[in-house]
Amino acid sequence: MAHTAAPGTERARVRPKDDQPVRIGVTGIGIMGSNHARVLSQLPGAELVAVADPDQEQAQRVANFLGCQAVGDHRALLDLGLDAVVVAAPTHLHHPIALDVIAAGCSVLVEKPVASTVEEGREIVAAAREKGVTLMVGHVERFNPAVRAVKEAIRDESLLSIAITRVGPFPPRMSNVGVVIDLAVHDIDLIRWFTGSDILEVQPQTSAAIAEREDIALLQFRTTSGVLAHINTNWLTPFKARTVHVATRKKYVIGDLLTRQVTEHFDYRPDGSYSTRHLPVAYAEPLRAELENFLSAVRTGRAPEVTGEEGVSSLEIAISCLPGSAPAKAAPSETAAEKRRALG
Ligand SMILES: NC(=O)c1ccc[n+]([C@@H]2O[C@H](COP(=O)([O-])OP(=O)(O)OC[C@H]3O[C@@H](n4cnc5c(N)ncnc54)[C@H](O)[C@@H]3O)[C@@H](O)[C@H]2O)c1
């Protein structure tokens, strides 16, 4: 499907037909954007038309490798008449870029966190809704097969607590956000998703041990459904570790998100013995599954797995964990699951 409208101009939104690939571009071809472009170039439902980055050498290198065009910014991308754009530029640029993409009538997948502030995130959500385009936020951990195996293991269980560890060394290039906004936002999203519930109470402890912004955090939460949750995250560990532990009334589930091993312990007996089961974990690249979900939402108009509203809710909780922030209060009457149902 070819579009010729310039960015910002009105045009009717037409969703690509089933037999046509979604014409898509990626803006911000750094670490994450290069991965998006690589996966999109391999997906049968997508046509990777171009990549954009002010670093022309980098954009050209990726474009040559993947066989698409290289342009300097998202405006030049939009001139190519696309159905959708992935925004993987630095976080502080998500807001202006996403608004331009939406104004041009294109669907958009914005990397996490959706924006730098809750207000900016809400503006992106409102613009997408008004324009009737698909907006998804790149909380890719939801598509990690080990996370999905944990989610399946706790389905229909009465959840008691969730403890998530996400630690590792400092990233090679420091962005202008700390570890809470960069890493803990993944786990805030997982806690909300596992519990189908919003976060009601936040008890954060953060510290800037070495960096300018917080580089170590222990965050405690209580959800509207009464589940206790804990996130241990930092950039001060020499190796990467990502684990999820979930206690339910009947089971204790442990997931290692890196080795993708998921185990449940159950059937506790008075003599101290119990049963252990290793759960099957599918083989899948999380980013591929995320992009397939996005392409399907673009085609059908159905809500993507991670909506803009959910991205904003997780960002709001993450920001409320920062020193000097007002505590975030979720509306206890409307859970995340209810909001998702309402969004269809
Ligand atoms: N979902 C995840 O697991 C995950 C992992 C890493 C990063 N991210 C997110 O992806 C985004 C990018 O992170 P990264 O680690 O790839 O950063 P990066 O620094 O590797 O890449 C950012 C790229 O954006 C380019 N850029 C700068 N200004 C631009 C502009 N105006 N338009 C287009 N591109 C521009 C830079 O030249 C650079 O190539 C961030 O929002 C980050 O939070 C998500």
Image: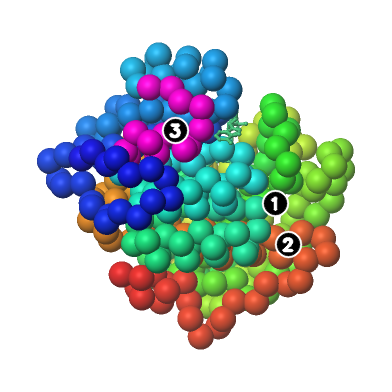
Please name the residue that numbered disc 1 is placed on.
180
Whether residue 265 can be seen here: no
Q: Find out whether the residues at labels 1 and 2 contact each other: C-beta distance under 8 Å.
A: yes
Q: Is residue 68 magenta?
A: no
Look at label 2 and name its amino acid.
Cys
The residue at 47%/66% (across/down) is 126
Crowding at dot 2, Cα within 10 Å, few <14 / some 14-19 / many 20+, comes out as many
Identify which residue, 221 or 170, lies in the foreground.
170
Dot 3 falls on a residue whose secondary structure is helix
How far apart are the two marked residues, 1 and 2, measured between alpha carbons?
Answer: 8 Å
User: Disc 3 vs disc 1: which is toward the camera?
Assistant: 3
Q: Which residue is mark 3?
A: 76
Looking at the image, do the residues carrying marks 2 and 3 touch, with CB atoms under 8 Å apart?
no
Q: Residue at x 48, y 14 (%)?
A: 61
Disc ID at residue 321: 2
Q: Where's ligand 1: which quadrant?
A: top right
What span is in magenta? 69-82
Is disc 1 placed on a helix, strand or loop?
helix
- What is the number of callouts on the image? 3
Disc 3 residue crowd, few under 14, some 14–19, many 20+, Cα 10 Å: some
Mark 1 or 2, nearer chain start: 1
Label 3 vs 1, first from the N-terminus: 3
Can the viewer see residue 51 in this picture? yes
Dot 1 amino acid type: Val
Residue 172 at what x, y percent from top left? 69, 27
